[in-house]
Amino acid sequence: MYAIKTKLILGAVACLIGITSCKRNEIQPYNGDRYLQFVDKYTDTIPVSFFLYPNKNEFQIKLPVKMVGIKTTENLSFSINVDAKATTAFPSLFNLDLKGTFKKGQARDTIIVNVFRQADLKGKETFLVLDLVANDNFKLGEVINRRRVLRITDKISKPVWWDATMTSTYLGTYSDKKFRTFVEVTGEGDLEIFSTEKRRDLMLEFKYYLIRMKDLGTPILEENGSDMLGSVPLIG
């Protein structure tokens, strides 16, 4: 009986040692090499909306890249590639340097993508897909961090900030025409960047515009012919 217990204990210890050894190997996947990957996952699509920013003609998008593995002892270059098959954005929409450099001792760099407003983009949605490329300096890192996707659009759609509270208390039921009118009147489409006070000021500006138009005998109507002002519950 004692011998059996001893064997069981020794077997358990051996298993634990084996598991520990495996785990130790798992947390050192980059030993001896340098790996390249974006800081963020490719599933986190980057929205670039010119409709939300009617007064903006250019966006500068920063894509941080990191190196994992042996620290650099000299400047090391890396490359990215525009995936021609997956990309639907036309070339005049964007500009970027396809080469980057990790400076000596640094583990991060940033790729800058410039995106431009184009008349051909009006009412459309396109995608720019960028992939990191392995070279003599770097292997590719985690699969989910090898690609970034930009969704570039000048197309109207319901914004995230137009939620249930916005509907019941402030601007009422969403419609494309109401949102388009709001943007035309206020010059703003993304209220998430503003304080609560600033948001209210913009919404009041919109409501006062609707009141003024109605007083002039030219009320702003919804697509179904109803008075847009009548669907705005904002008090003020």
Image (tube, grey):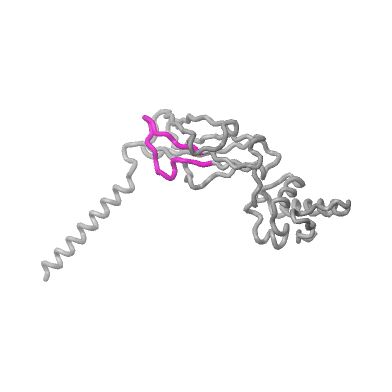
* Magenta part of the chain: 129-149
Q: Does the stretch in magenta take in 131?
A: yes
**Residue plotted at (44% across, 43% down):** 145
**Residue plotted at (72% across, 47% down):** 183
Q: Nearer the viewer, residue 70 or 221?
A: 221
Residue 12: x and y in percent read: 21, 61
Decide if residue 180 is on the left or right side of residue 66.
right
Q: Residue 33 sits in which quadrant?
A: top left
Residue 169: x and y in percent read: 72, 62
Q: Does the stretch in magenta take in 164?
A: no
Q: Nearer the viewer, residue 16 or 148?
A: 148
228 vs 183: above or below: below
Decide if residue 98 is on the left or right side of residue 195.
left
95 vs 41: above or below: above
Q: Nearer the viewer, residue 33 or 116?
A: 116
Q: Quadrant of the N terminus?
A: bottom left
Q: Quadrant of the C terminus?
A: bottom right
- Extreme-bottom residue of the structure: 1
130 vs 177: above or below: above
Query: Quick check: can you spot residue 124?
Result: yes
Tally of marks: 0
Residue 49: x and y in percent read: 63, 43
Query: Quick check: can you spot residue 198?
Result: no
**Residue plotted at (78% across, 58% down):** 226
Residue 163: x and y in percent read: 65, 58
- Extreme-right residue of the structure: 216
Decide if residue 205 is on the left or right side of residue 157.
right
